[in-house]
Image: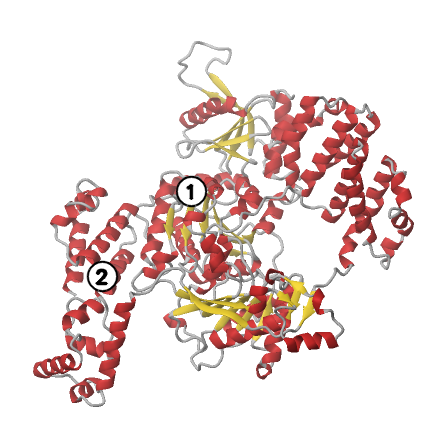
Amino acid sequence: MKNEKLTRKEIIDNRLKQAGWNVTDLTQVIEEFDIHLTVVEEPTTPYAGHQYSDYVLLGKDGKPLAVVEAKKTSVDAALGREQAKQYCYNIQSTQGVDLPFCFYTNGHDIYFWDLENYPPKKVYGFPTRDDLERYAYIRKARKPLAGELINTNIAGRNYQIASIRAVMEAVEKRKRKFLLVMATGTGKTRTCIALVDALMRAGWVERVLFLVDRIALRDQTLEAFKEHLPNEPRWLKQGEKEIATDRRIYVSTYPTMLNVIRNEEKSLSPHFFDLIVVDESHRSIYNTYQEILDYFNTITLGLTATPTDVIDHNTFQLFECEDGVPTFAYSYDEAVNHIPPFLSNFQVMKIKTKFQDEGISKRTISLEDQQKLMLEGKEIEEINYEGTEIEKKVINRGTNALIVREFMEESIKDANGVLPGKTIFFCISKAHARRVEEIFDSLYPEYKGELAKVLVSEDPRVYGKGGLLDQFVSNDMPRIAISVDMLDTGIDVRELVNLVFAKPVYSYTKFWQMIGRGTRLLEPEKIKPWCTQKDNFLILDCWDNFEYFKLNPRGKELKGQIPLPVRLFGIRLEKIEEAQTQSNSEIVNKEVQKIRKQVESLPKNSVVIMEAKHELQRLEDDNFWNNLTSDKMEFLEAVVKPLLRTVSDVDFKAMRFEKDIVEVSLAHLAGETEKFETLKESIIEEIGELPLSINIVAREQELIRQAQSNHYWATINEDKFEELIQKLSPLMKFREAVIPLAPAKFNLKDIVAEKEFVEFGPQHEALSVAKYRELVEKKINELVSSNPILQKLKQGQEISTDEAEQLAEELHNEHPHITIDLLRKVYNHRKAALVQFIKHILGIEQLETFAETVTKAFDDFIAKHSYLTSRQLQFLDLLKNFVLEKGDVSKCNLIESPFTMLHPEGIRGIFNQKEIDEILSLTEQVLAA
């Protein structure tokens, strides 16, 4: 273990150097910084009123910016916490400078304490001088967020304002992590951009990182920032490969950013960003990419569309929220039921074919098709497939063709009523997608191959301006995007009116993300000729997905897989234990060398490895490996083995073969004959799949031939196991060149076994109300041709009071239930006259319902008062619902229940007098409507 002096010289100096500090340059760093205390309150010490800070980091103006207190590696860094804090306050008082930032470290663990602002936090590197100067500027210049206005041109809906305000209030309370749960289509990205805008204007944030999980979403997000914050420089630009450090907005995929922070030659400072936004924050991020969030010292905002009730416990934990209680939530039901709706509702049509329902066998194949199969020389008795095996073990063109034809018949069409509107077909595999595309082309050749196109992520033609995705979004054709995973999440196409589930889905989170592709409403100012109207969208469910999720609301839980490097390390440890039991020191030494190599391959810049640096020190001592006692083996098993999950830059096909060989060698060593035979057969099969037609493989032809013989395995030993690993592992990547056994292919006629609309999701109006409106509208439109008063109205002329009364009487005679009271109730308008209802029905003027009038007035009020707090917004929401339910409100009501639930004094405890007057004026205005 290193003493304090060695820790400083060997580790801390080096880590400061990595952050750009030159420890020998007195204009940057002063070691043993002398703090001369003017008042000595304690007894005289050898220091006689002096304190010496291990390191003080200086700004460009030569003034102290930060204190670093060093402890030896063998002790807890926290022992330096109070000492470092004391030095910071003493430097502030003696030097007359701003309070320095506080760091304490034992070399491996570094803690950063922004005194008077945040509690100490473990960080994974020192800040650069630029970082510290940015921190100092932000600390001094930031403004209170309570009075910061929100740009309602970017995000002006009531729930968007409320969500931004909720995060800003949490930021001011010094929280560091937040989670927004907002249904797909409710404008998560816009809400986030408006939040970034407010935080930048208020001086709390200078650099932002927006993380997404695919390239198409990265490009879409960059476009959104370009539209709403055009003056903020963005990374990345087209053609850029390296990370640039002169931008304010950074949008990146998770893998790209992981590579950036692991790059030992040109890494990014852990203090580079002030805010990270994590798009689609669910299981995958903390399983794979939490390293990014741990690496950066920032405030972090998670965005997800997954419904609150099915969000994983770990996601809430990651963003420091109670289970089921995000920072803010706005659901799909709330958006659909808002007046007017913020999202489109949907209908579900279930389509099930005979083969999907009953399978493909002699019993279900038509006689005509059976005769064709016999002529082709196929044994009908041997054809027996379950419906669930379609597109896996068996391919039937007739089933795909039937689904395509049913889609063309049932789909929502464009304004001409001929072609389907914009559609996504969700397919099982890329081969399935290509088959569906080929069926569209052959059934509808008149569209010259432009109607339907396959969009898959590995096709370079999909991306960029003029690419297939851009064509689908911006052009009339193609109408149908056939996708495998690529379009399941995040792609924003408002004109989508059909979704076809041509595959089974088992993840509830993914299922709702896929549905979310169709929920966005059209923007009136951006109407496209191929979609001029969108009332709802249609889902064609060809695989009983809705039925599955009714029975299994949370879907199928995926079991986590142990990463391959971890499994290999674990098997080698087992082999060492077995060899120790047999006192076989030769095997022990050989395997020890192997696991040491695996430990050396750990990525040094990985946060996970930096976190474990203190424990990993034990492995640096050669004596550790000389005699692996049970406690050392336990340490390797419990502490070191899990770290192997960080290894990514390796040939996994070679490693899998190596793991198989080590496993079979362990069975051989332990005398487990049955297991050895099973593993041996599997390995012989793997070796047999190596293609000798490839030169580099052919060079090992002799070994490949021998390794498939029983004689070779009968005389197997450690040297032969090692030879297989050394010579054949690197060749395993060529195994994929071997064509796997193809599924059976048929072109059998399939028929629809079941077709029906399914009830799922938010419901529309009660049937009786809808039918009454239909009756009234039909009756009035029928009477126009014979009724002169109605004709007068239709031509835009006004009618007299007497004519209005005469018309009311005639309508009542035509149908006794057409009364002004019923019309007011059904059209939800308390004060409209009969003539207004008739003008509305004839399409002459639009009549707002009472609910629409109230909601619009409250939404406008909130947009004009974007400084309101979360509690004030909560009060206004309660007041709006009170007015809608009761149809009235008095001043007295506002200081009674339910308003006293928010504050004992009701409105008086939440708003000032000027705001109360404005709210009273608002309620008078809506009640007069």
Q: Up-down: is 321 above or below 849?
A: above
**Dot 1 crowding, Cα within 10 Å, few <14, some 14–19, many 20+:** some
Q: Up-down: is 570 above or below 730?
A: above
- The answer for how far apart the CA atoms under marks 1 and 2 are is 42 Å
Kindly identify which residue carries mark 2: 854
Q: Up-down: is 135 above or below 223?
A: above
Kindly identify which residue carries mark 1: 138
Q: State the residue in front, 21 or 856.
A: 856
Query: At numbered mark 1, what does the secondary structure look like: helix, strand or loop?
Result: helix
Q: Residue at x 66, y 34 (%)?
A: 641
Q: Which mark, residue 167?
A: none
**Dot 2 crowding, Cα within 10 Å, few <14, some 14–19, many 20+:** many
Proximity of marks 1 and 2: CB atoms separated by less than 8 Å:
no
Taking the image as drawn, is residue 464 in sight? no
Amino acid type, label 2? Val
Q: Place residue 215 in its image quadrant.
A: bottom right
